[in-house]
């Protein structure tokens, strides 16, 4: 078994690695729709070739600026367009953020992810404070990730200089379904920011959400778009929609564990070196369902009892689960 590789951008790839960037929709569909045992066997085999199957990366999330967002993303409780239980809060001060990072580190997290409810980054005092948060997290010896909305090239470069490990910017769904969920920006805007992040030498964290009323073809199309990026995103978060009261998507039916496992397994097969993160939605999943997703190739989770504004299983619960499965945090 080869050792886990944090970035396929710098990886010497052996020819048998299944690393491809030219996946077609039909190929993605054929993989996703394999009989379940065959899909899981294939995904787990590829997983073991490239990663330690018993180790899980723990990432902790912190909302550094909450709510009152001008965007109208139909899934998001932080949008100012909807009346949700989220109270808006201004940008946190640097020291408080670094304290939270240090606590997360003591609890076993190796990556600290900071999220801001912004449409895009504006130059000025607030961005300068975020740059300090990034360098402070790196000084603790942790990986630093931020998700701040759209970025211009010079802002991506400043984040790179501050030592940022990864930028999270999700495509969320396939290109055709995107404007059914969000009207205040277009898919192309997302792709532009991802390009700016990549050009600045920051690793890319990019995935999506299932359970927003999309058809299977939209999920497959999202996976195709991700898997035809060269290099692949180093991290691929697969979120199940957290249905929040007041958002347009609050009444969507829940996502099943089998749907989650199929998405994760397909992502693992298409992007063998990437980290696949079983992201939002774990409070609704049984231990058995989560174990299935680990087997399918998920090797990262968000740890800590809060995502950005919604609940997540507690650190204790997660460590207990990993223990029961004979697995461990990285
Ligand atoms: N405002 C920035 C942006 O949208 O890029 C960064 C923060 S935003 C909250 C980050 C990601 O959280 C979104 O792209 C989406 O994938 C995810 N997200 C937001 N609300 C969610 C929900 N209710 N369920 C699952 N994922 C959600
Ligand atoms: C990602 O893919 N999921 C995280 C993180 N990246 C930023 C966010 C999930 C948010 C769930 C809803 C909330 O807690 O507000
Ligand atoms: Fe704003 Fe991001 Fe939420 Fe969209 S997902 S409303 S951009 S915080």
Image (cartoon, grey):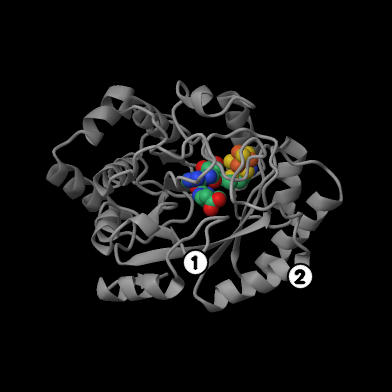
Point out residue 326 in the picture as x, y percentages from the top left corner. 26, 74
Disc assigned to residue 95? 2
Q: Nearer the viewer, residue 71 or 265?
A: 71
Q: Residue at x 39, y 46 (%)?
A: 13
- Cβ of mark 2 under 8 Å from ligand 2: the answer is no
Q: Residue at x 63, y 69 (%)?
A: 101
Q: Is residue 324 visible?
A: yes
Question: As drawn, is 127 to the left or to the right of 312?
Answer: right
Inter-mark Cα distance, 2 to 1: 21 Å
Point out residue 265 in the picture as x, y percentages from the top left corner. 28, 45
Quadrant assignment for the C terminus: bottom left
Q: Is residue 93 above or below residue 247?
A: below
Occupied quadrant, residue 270: top left
Disc assigned to residue 12? none
Point out residue 157 in the picture as x, y percentages from the top left corner. 73, 44
Number of callouts: 2
Q: In this view, does 51 lie above or below 141?
A: above
Q: Can residue 22 be seen in this view?
A: no
Question: As drawn, is 173 to the left or to the right of 264?
Answer: right
Q: Which type of secondary structure does the marked residue at label 1 adopt?
A: loop
Q: Residue at x 48, y 43 (%)?
A: 233
Disc assigned to residue 305? 1
Q: Which residue is drawn at 56% across and 28% down?
A: 182
Q: Which of 274 and 118 is in front in this view?
A: 118
For mark 2, does the 10 Å Cα neighbourhood hold few (<14), some (14 to 19), or many (20 or more) residues? Answer: few
Q: Which type of secondary structure does the marked residue at label 2 adopt?
A: helix
For mark 1, does the 10 Å Cα neighbourhood hold few (<14), some (14 to 19), or many (20 or more) residues? Answer: some
């Amino acid at each position: 078994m080869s050792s886990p590789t944090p970035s396929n951008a710098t990886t010497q790839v052996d020819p048998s690695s299944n690393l491809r960037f030219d996946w077609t929709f039909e190929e993605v569909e054929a993989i996703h729709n394999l009989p379940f045992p065959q899909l899981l066997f294939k995904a787990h085999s590829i997983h073991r070739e490239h990663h330690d199957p018993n180790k899980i990366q723990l990432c902790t999330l912190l909302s550094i600026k909450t709510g009152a967002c001008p965007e109208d993303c139909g899934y998001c409780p932080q949008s100012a367009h909807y009346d949700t239980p989220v109270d808006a809060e201004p940008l946190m001060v640097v020291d408080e953020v670094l304290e939270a990072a240090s606590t997360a580190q003591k609890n076993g997290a190796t990556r600290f992810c900071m999220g801001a409810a912004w449409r895009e980054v504006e130059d000025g005092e607030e961005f300068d404070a975020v740059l300090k948060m990034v360098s402070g997290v790196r000084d603790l010896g942790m990986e630093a990730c931020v998700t701040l909305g759209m970025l211009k090239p010079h802002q991506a470069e400043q984040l790179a200089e501050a030592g940022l490990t990864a930028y999270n910017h999700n495509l969320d769904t396939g290109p055709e379904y995107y404007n059914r969920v969000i009207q205040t920006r277009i898919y192309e805007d997302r792709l532009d920011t991802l390009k700016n992040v990549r050009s600045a030498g920051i690793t890319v964290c990019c995935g999506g959400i299932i359970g927003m009323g999309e058809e299977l073809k939209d999920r497959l199309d999202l996976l195709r778009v991700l898997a035809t990026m060269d290099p692949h995103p180093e991290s691929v978060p697969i979120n199940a929609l957290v249905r929040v009261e007041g958002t347009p998507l609050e009444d969507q039916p829940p996502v099943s564990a089998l749907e989650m496992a199929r998405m994760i397994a397909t992502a693992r097969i298409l992007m063998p070196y990437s980290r696949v993160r079983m992201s939002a939605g774990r409070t609704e999943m049984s231990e058995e369902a989560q174990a299935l997703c680990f087997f399918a190739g998920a090797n990262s989770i968000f740890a800590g009892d809060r995502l950005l504004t919604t609940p997540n299983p507690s650190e204790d619960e997660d460590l207990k689960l990993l223990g029961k499965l004979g697995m461990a945090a990285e």
